[in-house]
Amino acid sequence: MAKVILGSWRDDVTDNRGLKKSAIPEAFKGLKEFESGNDILAFMGWDGFFLFDRDAPVVDMARAYVEKAQEESCGYCTPCRVGTKVVAEKLAALADGHGRREDIDAIRSMAAVIRDASMCELGHTSMTALLKMMELAPEAFEEAVAGRAPVKRGNYRAMATAPCIEACPAHLDIPEYVDAIRSGNYYESLAIIGRKNPLAGVCGRVCVRPCEFVCRREELDEAISIKHLKRFVNDQIVSYVSARSKPLEEIPSASGKKAAIIGAGPCGLTAAFYLKRKGHEVHIFEDLREPGGMSAVGIPDYRLPRDVISSEVRRISEIGVKFHYGKRLGRDLSLSQLETEYDSVLISVGAHGSKSVGMEGEDANSEGYVAGVTFLRDLNLLHHIGEFKPPEGTRVVVVGGGNVAMDCARSAVRLGYSKVSVVYRRTQKEMPADHEEIEGAMEEGVEFLFLTHPVRIDAEAGKVKGITCVKMDLGEPDASGRRRPVEVKGSDFFIECDIVIPAIGQSSDFSFLSDGSGIETTKWGTIAVDDNTMMTGRDRVFAGGDCVSGPAALIDAMGHGLRVAHCMDQRMRGEKMSMPEAERMFRLLKTMSLPQAPVNRLGNKARCRLEMRPARERTSDFVEIERGLKPDEAIREAERCLRCYRIALFATEE
Amino acid sequence: MTTIIETKKKVRLEIDGKTVLAPEGATILEAARAVGVRIPTLCYHEALSPIGSCRVCVVEVEGVDRPATACNTQALDGMRVATRSERLFNLRREVIRMILAHHPLNCSPCPKNGDCELQDIAYEYDLAPNDFGSYSIKTEEYPWKEFSTPILDYHPRRCVLCGRCVKVCKEIRGLGAITMAGPGALASIQPALADPESPSRCVSCGECMRVCPVNAIEERMGGGKGKPWETEKTATTCAYCGVGCSLELNVVNGKVVGVTTDDATGVNKGRLCSKGRFGYAFIHSGERLSKPLIRNEKGELEETTWTKALTRVAREFRRSIAEHGPDSIAGLSSARCTNEENYLFQRFIRQAIGSNNVDHCARL
Ligand SMILES: Cc1cc2nc3c(=O)[nH]c(=O)nc-3n(C[C@H](O)[C@H](O)[C@H](O)COP(=O)(O)OP(=O)(O)OC[C@H]3O[C@@H](n4cnc5c(N)ncnc54)[C@H](O)[C@@H]3O)c2cc1C
Ligand code: SF4
Ligand code: SF4
Ligand code: SF4
Ligand code: SF4
Ligand code: FES
């Protein structure tokens, strides 16, 4: 626990130097070391600073902070572009021992100009901590002038971040790629995305976009359409590049090391892409005949056309990643075999089994009872080649309230069933599915039975005839804060149907793991990995994606892929393994959970709406529903971004 | 007859105590100008959408702590705006000071001297070179780099990074051939390439040079330009094509040294293409024909009069038609003619000569 000696956040001052005391954080729980054995001495952020050590190098830290601000300044507006340069030079002079008293005043006045007159949040926030330090610890600056000798130097870890960057599991530099769109530099924008995310076209369509939920523009009017902008820039470049049909160049495998990846889902693809970029030979082994994992065989084509996935995968194979389809770990390959042939192995097999609802008659495997993920997989693999045989019948009941349930229901509508119903045990408000998905399903004629829980599958002669449900009531909130549904006694009722599709969750199949492999699974049915390195209990074997986190989202799996590639690379090069430094800082920021400052700006400009195919037209096929942004809309949307950049800096012992 | 119905809603706001009724969507700057309140600007340019980069136009809006930039902040109903205060004066002065910390204040040899927006605003805010001694930063040397076109030279140290050139190229030329790229104090204007290998999209129109408030973009068409006060401007019409853009020939000592435009005049409202803006070298060329010439028996060109020359042409046309028929004659007209002139020309070839062999150089 890091105890605050002197600090301030949003003008709330904590002073434990024996002078005065205040109520706000005296200490940060869970914050002590930057990495093991390396204590944090101080923190400087966008709304203030905290000193945890009496000897924290105040002046030199301020210099490092402002130098970082100058490095991150985009150069667009005068105060931040020139001002941070001037302040950084003056602080460097102070730290070097040849500063003058006037410099202190000049720093103070220029800092105020930068704060008040800059354009974006980087300039608005980069001087706050410095000004506060000069106010609360003026002696440090005075001494630097009087001493006429270099001040104590420190070690710093600094980065530019933003709320949206922090919320994205892959920590994409969102404001930067949005800004490149605003300037019309689409190629550059896609390259910025590609630093963290090789599947821009996929994420630009179906990402669950945690970034948009924290977007600060929401306070003024509406969040930025980060997802749509990603799709826009991907589609612009893809059509441009494929028009020239120039393949990417293969990256040579210079390291002499080989990595095997099990599963060509988002996690495996991402890890493969970055391992290849780091110069390793990379082989992906995939059970199915096509790549993409759940993005291909889970998500239906009307949300994510398969040619989007194949064009992204083409780029991954163009740089030299080798794909081996129809190879299943546990059937065609064994772990020990891979371990002898490869320098490291990644298990990213996802979660493809279906969790059971716990209804009576579920185990009977009656005809017409199809697990959601199985239904979608067969549909996705076979429908576009005309070989899909939909389950027979006319009435479908889908059980569940998440996105998978919505995909099943909306696909069923497209297959022409006469009635499709969703039963969910809580109300619409509690549904975990995206509200756009729910509204889309409603528009397409899906019936929703809320506060309804299935208890029994009724079958006759091995064929589903219907489903018996009970009505529920919302009781006390549970651990997740959602009100727990309780059964209403005697409210049983029967729904006649031919097909029941349970879609309440997925589980992983680890039958390829033998006892004594050293790889452990958790009580949630996932593979246990070291939080720092993502390595399993067995040396050189790593795991990531849904099979580690449990069913999550694409971008979570891709964030895993990015991180695991970092550590696999270190392991193969024989270096000490450790999560990327930025990841460590994001976690420390999360631990500190500092209060956000309100947006102090003027603005009213609603986000751009996407054109959708009308419900009547779209329900008879699997053609993509959403149309992309047009260039002028995209630029207008990009212009709305406030660029909430801010600098975080940790002063550490080493 | 059509009646124009004013559909735009109006917003009512107060600027420096004056009540303003501005159309919805107007900026604070536009609203202020409408009632004669002057707010200083540098990056703002009437022909372009607001840029918001220089931060000179800051104003105070009641209820918001941070000053807002008038050029790109929408005027809203009920707003109370102050454009003058000690705080604003200081902010503006400091911001200009920062620009000058980067810009070499070497005005006397600069051809913009006397016609420079930066010089004007520095003067207005009473800033002289020794005012920012304490701010002067170690300016990094920029390596010389090819700009988007060889016809223009870009000087990063003179550039105030207002961003007008980037905007004009995107909004008026419709290209986006240049962009601003950091980091920080090393930011400069650079060619914007669709991908690293693609060629520059620039068409050398020089629009970027036109809107540059300082002398950061210069044409490389030969030196010897005069200062604004020794330059005589002659308004004329571009002779290159039928559009007929208005331009001003800048004349020093009887010699054309450049072309400028007036944003308010003519069909082009200040815009020109590369020919109109840079194609003036022919005016003083020794090879330029100024009198009609006829080839004599020895095959040499000899000066003559228009009457003699045209009579000779008419005679040869007749002879050719008589000996070989009208199809032996073809007409090729010039893009420098107007539509009407081209029309007359083809009528002449078809009717007076009797040939259908007529075309226009723009089709070649
Ligand atoms: C229907 C559905 C809809 C979804 N919609 C969204 C959405 O809109 N947005 C979103 O962000 N997320 C969505 N998700 C979640 C997202 O698809 C997953 O979180 C993500 O695909 C997980 O990636 P992964 O790489 O860990 O695993 P997967 O994508 O599951 O990939 C694992 C791969 O490994 C292969 N494999 C499995 N076992 C073996 C083996 N033994 N040997 C060889 N290969 C094997 C599989 O065939 C598969 O290709 C959805 C999921 C489903 C099921
Ligand atoms: S980062 Fe923001 S404040 Fe800094 S120069 Fe760019 S726009 Fe201005
Ligand atoms: S406004 Fe831009 S920078 Fe700020 S949170 Fe939203 S997307 Fe991120
Ligand atoms: S010369 Fe014209 S096309 Fe070229 S950069 Fe300047 S404005 Fe753009
Ligand atoms: S070159 Fe001229 S117009 Fe372009 S940013 Fe620099 S000063 Fe502005
Ligand atoms: S004139 Fe408004 S920011 Fe430059």
Image: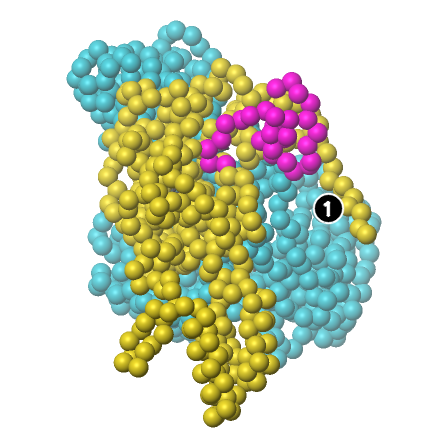
Residue indicated by mark 1: A427
Magenta residues?
B16-44
Mark 1 residue element: loop
Q: Magenta stretch: residue B29 in it?
A: yes
Question: Residue A312: which quarter of the image?
Answer: bottom left
Q: What is the quadrant of the C terminus of chain B in the image?
A: bottom left
Left or right placement of residue B105 versus residue A114 in this view: left
Q: Nearer the viewer, residue A425 or B37?
A: B37
| Image x and y of residue A193, in percent | 43, 52
Residue at image location 45% in from the left, 15% down from the top: A13
The hue used for chain A is cyan
From where the camera sits, is residue B174 visible? yes
A382 w.r.t. B88: above or below: below
Q: Which chain is indicated by disc 1?
A: A
Left or right placement of residue A371 versus residue A343 in this view: right
B51 w.r.t. B283: above or below: above
Left or right placement of residue A609 versus residue A449 in this view: left
| Image x and y of residue A283, in percent | 34, 67
| Image x and y of residue B74, in percent | 61, 34
Q: Nearer the viewer, residue B105 or B232?
A: B232
Q: Which chain is yellow?
A: B
Q: Nearer the viewer, residue B81 or A523?
A: B81
Q: Magenta stretch: residue A465 in it?
A: no
Amino acid residing under circle 1:
Thr
From where the camera sits, is residue A121 visible? no
| Image x and y of residue A565, in percent | 34, 54
Q: Nearer the viewer, residue B2 or B287?
A: B287
Residue at image location 66% in from the left, 57% down from the top: A611
Residue at image location 33% in from the left, 55% down from the top: B284
Question: Residue A155: which quarter of the image?
Answer: top left
Left or right placement of residue B178 versus residue B22 in this view: left
